[in-house]
Image (spheres, rainbow, N blue to C red):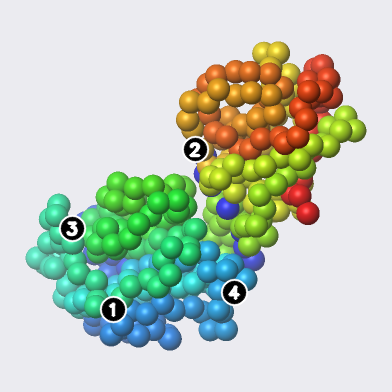
Amino acid sequence: MERIFSFFLSLVLAASCAACGSPTNSDAAPLPENGAGSSAVSGSDQSSGVQNTPEGNTGAETGGRVLVAYFSATGTTRDVAETLAQSLNADLFEILPAQPYTAADLDYNSDCRANAEQQDKIARPAIASGCVVENWASYDVVLLGHPIWWGIPPKIMRTFAESYDWSGKTVAGFCTSGGSAYSNTGLPELTEGAVWLEGRRFSGAVSPDDIAGWAEDLHLHAADAQAADQLQVSFNGHTYTAALADNTSAAAFAALLAENGGSLTIQAHDYGGFEKVGGLPASLPQNDEPIDAAAGDLILYQGNNIVLYYSTNSWTFTRLGRLEGDLSTLEADLGEGNVEITYSLAG
Protein backbone atom coordinates (compact mmCIF):
# COMPACT_ATOMS: atom_id res chain seq x y z
CA MET A 1 0.00 0.00 0.00
CA GLU A 2 1.42 3.21 -0.79
CA ARG A 3 1.39 6.79 -0.09
CA ILE A 4 0.41 12.66 -1.05
CA PHE A 5 -0.37 16.04 -5.40
CA SER A 6 -2.07 16.32 -8.68
CA PHE A 7 0.22 15.46 -11.56
CA PHE A 8 -0.30 16.69 -15.04
CA LEU A 9 2.42 14.94 -16.95
CA SER A 10 2.99 16.02 -20.48
CA LEU A 11 6.23 14.34 -21.32
CA VAL A 12 8.30 12.59 -23.86
CA LEU A 13 11.03 10.39 -22.50
CA ALA A 14 13.87 9.04 -24.48
CA ALA A 15 16.03 6.67 -22.61
CA SER A 16 18.85 4.30 -22.93
CA CYS A 17 20.15 2.59 -19.85
CA ALA A 18 22.39 4.43 -17.41
CA ALA A 19 23.85 1.52 -15.53
CA CYS A 20 27.15 -0.12 -14.94
CA GLY A 21 25.88 -3.47 -13.82
CA SER A 22 26.15 -7.16 -14.27
CA PRO A 23 27.00 -8.30 -17.82
CA THR A 24 23.60 -9.99 -17.84
CA ASN A 25 21.86 -6.62 -17.58
CA SER A 26 20.77 -4.75 -20.67
CA ASP A 27 21.39 -1.45 -18.92
CA ALA A 28 25.13 -1.20 -19.46
CA ALA A 29 26.20 2.40 -19.83
CA PRO A 30 27.39 3.85 -23.13
CA LEU A 31 29.49 7.00 -23.37
CA PRO A 32 27.71 9.67 -21.33
CA GLU A 33 25.54 11.87 -23.49
CA ASN A 34 27.39 15.05 -22.49
CA GLY A 35 30.83 13.59 -22.90
CA ALA A 36 32.91 11.18 -20.87
CA GLY A 37 32.34 11.65 -17.18
CA SER A 38 29.92 14.54 -17.66
CA SER A 39 27.10 14.85 -15.19
CA ALA A 40 25.94 18.29 -16.24
CA VAL A 41 22.35 19.43 -16.47
CA SER A 42 21.11 22.60 -18.06
CA GLY A 43 21.12 25.34 -15.46
CA SER A 44 23.27 23.44 -12.97
CA ASP A 45 26.59 24.36 -11.43
CA GLN A 46 28.79 21.30 -11.13
CA SER A 47 31.32 23.06 -8.97
CA SER A 48 28.78 23.89 -6.30
CA GLY A 49 26.08 21.32 -6.89
CA VAL A 50 23.52 24.02 -6.25
CA GLN A 51 19.81 23.31 -6.18
CA ASN A 52 18.19 23.57 -9.59
CA THR A 53 14.64 23.97 -10.80
CA PRO A 54 13.24 23.51 -14.29
CA GLU A 55 13.18 26.64 -16.41
CA GLY A 56 10.43 28.97 -15.25
CA ASN A 57 9.76 26.89 -12.14
CA THR A 58 10.41 28.42 -8.75
CA GLY A 59 8.66 25.74 -6.76
CA ALA A 60 6.36 28.41 -5.35
CA GLU A 61 3.15 26.48 -5.95
CA THR A 62 4.33 23.62 -3.74
CA GLY A 63 5.93 25.90 -1.17
CA GLY A 64 9.21 24.03 -1.59
CA ARG A 65 7.62 20.90 -0.16
CA VAL A 66 8.63 18.51 -2.97
CA LEU A 67 12.16 17.74 -4.08
CA VAL A 68 13.31 15.54 -6.95
CA ALA A 69 16.88 14.52 -6.12
CA TYR A 70 18.79 12.31 -8.53
CA PHE A 71 22.14 10.92 -9.59
CA SER A 72 22.74 10.38 -13.30
CA ALA A 73 26.01 9.24 -14.84
CA THR A 74 24.86 9.19 -18.47
CA GLY A 75 21.79 11.41 -18.54
CA THR A 76 19.04 8.79 -18.62
CA THR A 77 17.94 9.25 -15.02
CA ARG A 78 18.26 13.00 -15.47
CA ASP A 79 15.66 12.91 -18.25
CA VAL A 80 13.13 11.23 -15.97
CA ALA A 81 13.97 13.49 -13.03
CA GLU A 82 13.59 16.68 -15.06
CA THR A 83 10.22 15.53 -16.39
CA LEU A 84 8.94 14.68 -12.92
CA ALA A 85 10.16 17.98 -11.47
CA GLN A 86 8.53 19.96 -14.25
CA SER A 87 5.25 18.10 -13.99
CA LEU A 88 5.15 18.44 -10.19
CA ASN A 89 6.46 22.00 -10.17
CA ALA A 90 8.99 20.57 -7.73
CA ASP A 91 12.54 21.59 -6.98
CA LEU A 92 15.27 19.65 -8.77
CA PHE A 93 18.61 18.66 -7.28
CA GLU A 94 21.42 16.79 -8.99
CA ILE A 95 23.72 14.66 -6.84
CA LEU A 96 27.14 15.38 -8.30
CA PRO A 97 30.11 13.09 -7.57
CA ALA A 98 33.35 14.68 -6.41
CA GLN A 99 35.05 12.60 -9.11
CA PRO A 100 32.83 12.47 -12.22
CA TYR A 101 32.40 9.07 -13.84
CA THR A 102 34.18 8.57 -17.15
CA ALA A 103 33.25 6.08 -19.84
CA ALA A 104 36.05 3.84 -18.58
CA ASP A 105 34.64 4.07 -15.05
CA LEU A 106 31.37 2.64 -16.39
CA ASP A 107 32.80 -0.13 -18.57
CA TYR A 108 31.36 -3.15 -16.79
CA ASN A 109 33.40 -5.56 -18.95
CA SER A 110 36.53 -4.33 -17.21
CA ASP A 111 37.68 -3.89 -13.65
CA CYS A 112 36.00 -0.51 -13.68
CA ARG A 113 35.54 1.95 -10.88
CA ALA A 114 31.76 1.47 -10.71
CA ASN A 115 32.11 -2.30 -10.48
CA ALA A 116 34.62 -1.96 -7.66
CA GLU A 117 32.38 0.43 -5.74
CA GLN A 118 29.30 -1.76 -6.10
CA GLN A 119 31.15 -4.80 -4.80
CA ASP A 120 32.57 -2.91 -1.82
CA LYS A 121 30.08 -3.11 1.04
CA ILE A 122 31.41 0.02 2.73
CA ALA A 123 32.02 2.15 -0.37
CA ARG A 124 30.75 5.72 -0.04
CA PRO A 125 31.79 7.73 -3.13
CA ALA A 126 32.23 11.37 -2.23
CA ILE A 127 29.74 14.02 -3.31
CA ALA A 128 31.12 17.20 -4.87
CA SER A 129 32.04 19.98 -2.48
CA GLY A 130 29.17 22.40 -2.08
CA CYS A 131 26.65 19.95 -3.52
CA VAL A 132 24.19 20.36 -0.66
CA VAL A 133 20.40 20.60 -0.64
CA GLU A 134 19.46 24.02 0.66
CA ASN A 135 16.49 24.26 3.03
CA TRP A 136 16.35 20.49 3.38
CA ALA A 137 13.98 20.72 6.34
CA SER A 138 11.35 22.46 4.21
CA TYR A 139 10.77 19.39 2.03
CA ASP A 140 8.09 16.93 3.05
CA VAL A 141 8.39 14.71 -0.01
CA VAL A 142 11.56 13.56 -1.77
CA LEU A 143 11.53 11.68 -5.08
CA LEU A 144 14.87 9.91 -5.19
CA GLY A 145 16.20 8.80 -8.58
CA HIS A 146 19.20 6.81 -9.79
CA PRO A 147 20.31 4.20 -12.31
CA ILE A 148 20.79 0.54 -11.34
CA TRP A 149 24.34 -0.81 -11.14
CA TRP A 150 24.84 -4.47 -10.33
CA GLY A 151 21.16 -4.74 -9.43
CA ILE A 152 21.18 -1.98 -6.77
CA PRO A 153 21.49 1.82 -6.56
CA PRO A 154 24.97 3.28 -7.08
CA LYS A 155 26.80 3.58 -3.78
CA ILE A 156 26.84 7.37 -4.02
CA MET A 157 23.14 7.21 -3.16
CA ARG A 158 24.13 5.85 0.24
CA THR A 159 26.48 8.80 0.66
CA PHE A 160 23.57 11.12 -0.08
CA ALA A 161 21.20 9.26 2.25
CA GLU A 162 23.65 9.50 5.15
CA SER A 163 24.04 13.24 4.67
CA TYR A 164 20.56 14.32 5.81
CA ASP A 165 17.92 13.91 8.51
CA TRP A 166 14.98 12.07 6.93
CA SER A 167 12.62 12.23 9.90
CA GLY A 168 9.02 12.82 8.84
CA LYS A 169 9.72 12.75 5.12
CA THR A 170 7.91 10.70 2.51
CA VAL A 171 10.24 9.14 -0.05
CA ALA A 172 9.36 7.73 -3.45
CA GLY A 173 12.21 6.09 -5.33
CA PHE A 174 12.57 5.72 -9.08
CA CYS A 175 15.31 4.21 -11.17
CA THR A 176 16.29 3.77 -14.80
CA SER A 177 17.37 0.40 -16.13
CA GLY A 178 17.23 -1.55 -19.35
CA GLY A 179 16.65 -4.85 -17.60
CA SER A 180 17.20 -4.83 -13.85
CA ALA A 181 14.23 -4.52 -11.52
CA TYR A 182 13.63 -1.53 -9.24
CA SER A 183 15.79 -1.57 -6.13
CA ASN A 184 16.34 0.77 -3.20
CA THR A 185 18.69 -1.68 -1.48
CA GLY A 186 20.79 -0.02 1.20
CA LEU A 187 18.76 3.19 1.34
CA PRO A 188 15.75 2.69 3.67
CA GLU A 189 17.97 1.73 6.58
CA LEU A 190 19.96 4.95 6.07
CA THR A 191 16.88 7.17 6.03
CA GLU A 192 15.52 6.51 9.50
CA GLY A 193 12.23 8.26 10.12
CA ALA A 194 11.20 8.37 6.47
CA VAL A 195 8.19 6.60 5.00
CA TRP A 196 9.05 4.87 1.74
CA LEU A 197 6.42 4.53 -0.95
CA GLU A 198 6.49 1.85 -3.64
CA GLY A 199 9.23 2.67 -6.14
CA ARG A 200 9.25 2.35 -9.89
CA ARG A 201 11.71 1.33 -12.61
CA PHE A 202 11.60 3.18 -15.93
CA SER A 203 13.01 1.66 -19.10
CA GLY A 204 13.75 3.25 -22.44
CA ALA A 205 10.33 2.12 -23.66
CA VAL A 206 8.38 3.83 -20.88
CA SER A 207 5.32 5.78 -21.98
CA PRO A 208 4.02 9.05 -20.52
CA ASP A 209 0.89 7.19 -19.41
CA ASP A 210 2.99 4.72 -17.41
CA ILE A 211 4.76 7.52 -15.58
CA ALA A 212 1.50 9.36 -15.00
CA GLY A 213 -0.04 6.20 -13.59
CA TRP A 214 2.84 5.72 -11.16
CA ALA A 215 2.65 9.35 -10.10
CA GLU A 216 -1.07 9.15 -9.51
CA ASP A 217 -0.69 5.96 -7.48
CA LEU A 218 1.60 7.82 -5.08
CA HIS A 219 -1.24 10.18 -4.12
CA LEU A 220 1.13 13.07 -3.69
CA HIS A 221 -1.52 15.73 -4.20
CA ALA A 222 -0.45 17.92 -1.31
CA ALA A 223 -0.40 21.06 -3.49
CA ASP A 224 -4.18 21.09 -3.02
CA ALA A 225 -4.34 19.53 0.43
CA GLN A 226 -1.12 20.49 2.21
CA ALA A 227 -2.87 23.06 4.44
CA ALA A 228 -5.75 20.75 5.30
CA ASP A 229 -5.90 19.83 8.97
CA GLN A 230 -9.66 19.42 9.35
CA LEU A 231 -12.42 17.41 7.72
CA GLN A 232 -16.17 17.47 7.70
CA VAL A 233 -17.75 14.06 8.25
CA SER A 234 -21.42 13.81 7.25
CA PHE A 235 -23.99 11.03 7.57
CA ASN A 236 -27.76 10.73 8.03
CA GLY A 237 -28.19 14.51 7.97
CA HIS A 238 -25.55 15.11 10.66
CA THR A 239 -22.17 16.81 10.13
CA TYR A 240 -19.20 16.58 12.46
CA THR A 241 -15.82 18.29 12.27
CA ALA A 242 -12.72 16.13 12.53
CA ALA A 243 -9.10 17.08 13.20
CA LEU A 244 -6.61 15.19 11.05
CA ALA A 245 -3.71 13.33 12.62
CA ASP A 246 -0.18 14.60 12.03
CA ASN A 247 1.18 11.75 9.91
CA THR A 248 1.72 10.83 6.27
CA SER A 249 -1.39 8.65 6.26
CA ALA A 250 -3.69 11.55 7.15
CA ALA A 251 -1.91 13.78 4.65
CA ALA A 252 -2.38 11.13 1.99
CA PHE A 253 -6.07 10.86 2.85
CA ALA A 254 -6.47 14.64 2.53
CA ALA A 255 -4.67 14.44 -0.81
CA LEU A 256 -6.99 11.65 -1.94
CA LEU A 257 -9.97 13.85 -1.09
CA ALA A 258 -8.44 16.75 -3.03
CA GLU A 259 -7.88 14.44 -5.98
CA ASN A 260 -11.58 13.55 -5.92
CA GLY A 261 -12.90 17.10 -5.87
CA GLY A 262 -12.57 17.58 -2.12
CA SER A 263 -14.77 14.77 -0.84
CA LEU A 264 -15.46 11.06 -0.92
CA THR A 265 -18.65 9.21 -0.05
CA ILE A 266 -18.00 5.82 1.51
CA GLN A 267 -20.51 2.99 1.84
CA ALA A 268 -19.79 1.83 5.38
CA HIS A 269 -21.07 -1.23 7.19
CA ASP A 270 -21.29 -1.98 10.88
CA TYR A 271 -18.68 -4.23 12.39
CA GLY A 272 -18.44 -5.63 15.89
CA GLY A 273 -20.93 -3.25 17.42
CA PHE A 274 -18.28 -0.56 17.73
CA GLU A 275 -17.38 0.79 14.25
CA LYS A 276 -18.52 1.71 10.75
CA VAL A 277 -16.03 0.58 8.12
CA GLY A 278 -15.86 1.13 4.37
CA GLY A 279 -13.37 0.62 1.57
CA LEU A 280 -11.32 3.45 0.07
CA PRO A 281 -10.79 3.78 -3.70
CA ALA A 282 -7.00 3.61 -3.22
CA SER A 283 -4.50 2.39 -0.64
CA LEU A 284 -2.85 4.90 1.66
CA PRO A 285 0.43 4.86 3.57
CA GLN A 286 0.22 2.99 6.88
CA ASN A 287 1.66 4.19 10.19
CA ASP A 288 0.41 1.31 12.29
CA GLU A 289 0.70 1.35 16.06
CA PRO A 290 -1.22 -0.20 18.97
CA ILE A 291 -4.27 2.02 19.54
CA ASP A 292 -7.07 1.98 22.09
CA ALA A 293 -9.72 3.41 19.80
CA ALA A 294 -12.66 5.33 21.25
CA ALA A 295 -15.84 6.88 19.92
CA GLY A 296 -15.03 9.52 17.33
CA ASP A 297 -11.70 8.07 16.20
CA LEU A 298 -11.00 7.88 12.46
CA ILE A 299 -8.80 4.89 11.69
CA LEU A 300 -7.07 3.51 8.60
CA TYR A 301 -7.20 -0.28 8.55
CA GLN A 302 -4.99 -2.39 6.28
CA GLY A 303 -4.24 0.66 4.16
CA ASN A 304 -7.50 0.69 2.20
CA ASN A 305 -10.34 0.83 4.75
CA ILE A 306 -11.51 3.86 6.71
CA VAL A 307 -13.16 3.22 10.07
CA LEU A 308 -15.29 5.57 12.17
CA TYR A 309 -15.57 4.35 15.74
CA TYR A 310 -18.67 4.92 17.84
CA SER A 311 -17.45 2.71 20.70
CA THR A 312 -14.13 1.23 21.85
CA ASN A 313 -11.69 -1.31 20.47
CA SER A 314 -7.98 -2.05 20.77
CA TRP A 315 -5.85 -3.12 17.84
CA THR A 316 -2.83 -2.20 15.73
CA PHE A 317 -3.74 0.22 12.99
CA THR A 318 -3.22 3.81 11.78
CA ARG A 319 -4.81 6.92 13.23
CA LEU A 320 -6.24 9.32 10.62
CA GLY A 321 -7.95 11.79 12.94
CA ARG A 322 -10.72 12.31 15.44
CA LEU A 323 -14.16 13.90 15.52
CA GLU A 324 -14.38 17.05 17.64
CA GLY A 325 -17.10 18.46 19.85
CA ASP A 326 -19.99 16.69 21.59
CA LEU A 327 -19.99 13.00 20.64
CA SER A 328 -22.75 11.91 23.03
CA THR A 329 -25.19 11.21 20.17
CA LEU A 330 -22.66 9.84 17.67
CA GLU A 331 -23.82 6.22 17.88
CA ALA A 332 -27.46 7.21 17.47
CA ASP A 333 -26.62 9.60 14.60
CA LEU A 334 -24.80 6.82 12.74
CA GLY A 335 -27.76 4.48 13.17
CA GLU A 336 -27.81 0.73 12.89
CA GLY A 337 -26.42 -1.24 9.99
CA ASN A 338 -25.02 0.29 6.79
CA VAL A 339 -24.51 4.04 6.49
CA GLU A 340 -23.29 6.41 3.78
CA ILE A 341 -20.51 8.60 5.16
CA THR A 342 -19.11 11.60 3.27
CA TYR A 343 -15.61 12.82 4.16
CA SER A 344 -14.86 16.35 2.93
CA LEU A 345 -11.97 18.79 3.19
CA ALA A 346 -13.01 21.61 5.50
CA GLY A 347 -13.05 25.05 3.92
Q: Secondary structure at mark 3?
A: helix
- The picture quadrant where one finds residue 50 is bottom left
Q: How many marks?
A: 4
Gap between marks 2 and 4 measured at Cα: 29 Å
Q: Tell me residue 213's x, y (percent).
A: 58, 55
Pointer 4 or 1: first along the chain? 4
The residue that mark 2 highlights is: 287
Which secondary structure, mark 4?
Answer: helix
Q: Which residue is mark 4?
A: 60
User: From what the image shows, is residue 100 above or below residue 269?
Assistant: below
Callout 2: SS: loop
Query: Is the C-beta separation of discs 2 and 1 under 8 Å?
Result: no
Give the residue type that dot 3 points to.
Answer: Gln
Q: Residue at x 49, y 32 (%)?
A: 288
Q: Residues within 10 Å of mark 3 (few under 14, many from 20)?
A: many
Quote the CA–CA distance across marks 1 and 3: 24 Å
Which residue, given by chain and number where applicable, does mark 1 sit on? 130
Q: Position of residue 283 (x, y in %)?
A: 59, 40
Distance between the Cα atoms at labels 3 and 4? 38 Å
